[in-house]
Image (cartoon, grey):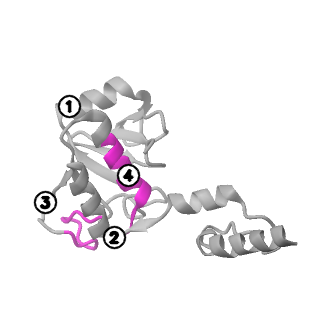
Amino acid sequence: MKLRSALTALTLFAAPAAVVLGGATGASAAPDTSTIAEAAAVTKISHASATSMFSGSGITWSSSGGCSDRNNPTCTSFEQLNLATAQGAQTLKSATGCALNITGGTETGHASGTYSHWNGYKLDYAKSTCVTNYIKNTFTYIGPRGDGALQYRSGSGNIYADEGNHWDVLYHNCGGC
């Protein structure tokens, strides 16, 4: 009976995050750890938290409008960025040793979809020889995207798309953080 009480308490603790995903288990069942792990993967962070993380890792960011308003397409915003996406940027910076400048975040103006910039799954990076060489020499080429952008998949499953003047990166996870 004590074990059941402990499991019920754990389920109730994890349920708020799991309910968002529609995967909460009933109070009488043990929590589904895959649902709990998924819920952790979609933790949202504020613009201030993201910029603190990026600054601490030596990652810069810029916007054509010199602003961070999520509702302005000329700004670069990190409001509602997935924590795993921010950690993925830190992992890329650490792995490459390259200068890394983010030019696109969660602001409006990008393509829509479940795994979109707006939903916190993507970042855009300014192109540099260092970053481009790392991506092309380390990750697996998987072919062109529907719009023709050449795609590379990291070992952790994140997708790097060459959009000509920048890299558009889809983070499914933190890249091994």
Task: Establish if 19 lies above or below 113.
Answer: below
Q: What is the CA distance from the residue labelled 1 to the residue labelled 3?
A: 23 Å
* Residue at left offset 18%, top offset 30%: 129
Task: Find the magenta span and give its range.
Answer: 68-92
- Front-lying residue, 5 or 97: 5
Depth check, mark 2 against mark 3: the one in front is: 2
Q: Give the x, y percent position of residue 58.
A: 20, 49
Q: Classify 10 Å Cα crowding around label 1: few (below 14), some (14-19), many (20 and above).
A: few
In this rendering, which labeled residue sits more in front, label 1 or label 4?
4
The numbered dot on residue 87 is: 4
Determine which quarter of the picture holds residue 11: bottom right
Mark closer to the chain start, 4 or 3: 3
Compared with 26, 76 (above or below) is above
How far is mark 1 from mark 2, CA to CA?
29 Å
- Magenta-span inclusion, residue 61: no
| In this rendering, position of residue 21 left or right of residue 67 | right
Quarter occupied by the N terminus: bottom right
Image location (x, y in percent) of residue 82: 42, 61
Furthest residue in direction top, as rendered: 137
Rendered residue at 35%/43% (across/down) = 91
Q: Name the residue under label 2.
A: 46
Q: Is residue 32 left or right of residue 75?
A: right
Callout 4–callout 3 Cβ contact below 8 Å: no
Residue corresponding to mark 3? 64
As measured in the structure, the alpha-carbon distance from the residue carrying label 4 to the one carrying label 3 is 24 Å
Contact? badges 2 and 3 (CB < 8 Å): no
Residue at (73%, 64%) from the top-left corner? Answer: 31
Amino acid tagged 1: Cys
Q: What element carries label 1?
A: helix
Which sits earlier in the primary sequence, circle 1 or circle 2? 2
Q: In which quarter of the image is residue 98?
A: top left
Residue 9 image position (x, y, % from top left): 71, 75
